[in-house]
Amino acid sequence: QVQLVESGGGLVQIGGSLKLSCTASGLIITTYNMAWFRQGPGKEREFVANITWSRGRTDYADSVKGRFTIARDNNKNTVYLQMNSLKPEDTAVYYCNANYALGTMSFWGQGTLVTVSS
C-alpha cells in the first residue's frame, strides 16, 4: 500500500520559514517524479515544485522561485520543501505528489496546512 505522509505545516509569520516533509512508503522515490502542489482558500490546486526521478532536476512555479527549494533524501525515502520569505499568498494546503517515471501511476498525500499571517 502506497502512502505519502506530509508534515511540517503550521502557522508562520510573514517573512518566516517552514520546511515540509513528504515521507513515502510502498514506493521508492527514485523511480518517481516527486512534486509539491498547493491549494489556497477558494483557489484551484496549483503546481509548486518538482524533482525528477533520475537526475534530480528541479523546477519551480514562478511565484516561488528563489524562495522555495525542493530536495530529496533517498535514504529516508523523503522529499522536502524548504520555504523561505513566506508571504500571505503562500497560505494553502500543500500536497505531495508522486508520478511513476515509467508508467501512469500517480499518488497524493493528504496535505499539510501552511498559514502565513502577520
Image (tube, rainbow, N blue to C red):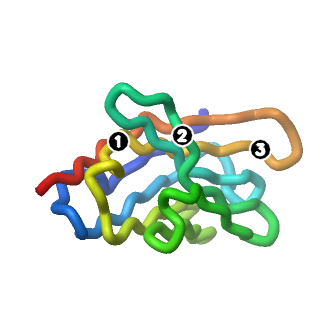
Task: Name the spot of residue 16 as percent of width and height, x first.
Answer: 23, 69
* Disc 2 + disc 1, Cβ < 8 Å: no
Give the amino acid type for the residue marked by disc 2 in the picture: Glu
Alpha carbon distance from label 2 to label 1: 10 Å
Indicate the secondary structure of the residue bearing disc 2.
strand
- Mark 1 and mark 3 lie on one chain; the one further toward the N terminus is 1
Which quarter of the figure has residue 14? bottom left
Residue depicted at x 53% and y 67%: 65
Give the amino acid type for the residue marked by disc 1 in the picture: Ala
Query: Which label lies toward us, 3 or 2?
Result: 2
Residue depicted at x 42% and y 29%: 43
- Decide: is 99 above or below 34: above
Alpha carbon distance from label 3 to label 2: 19 Å
Q: On the image, numbered disc 1 is attached to which residue?
A: 92
- Mark 2 and mark 1 lie on one chain; the one further toward the N terminus is 2
Q: On the image, numbered disc 3 is attached to which residue?
A: 100
Residue with the most extreme left position:
118
Task: Name the spot of residue 110 as percent of width and height, x first.
Answer: 43, 34
Residue depicted at x 22% and y 53%: 116
Task: From the viewer's side, name the closer residue of 78 and 19.
Answer: 19
Tell me the crowding category of disc 1: few under 14, some 14 to 19, or many 20 or more residues within 10 angstroms, Cα based. Answer: many
Q: On the image, numbered disc 2 is attached to which residue?
A: 46
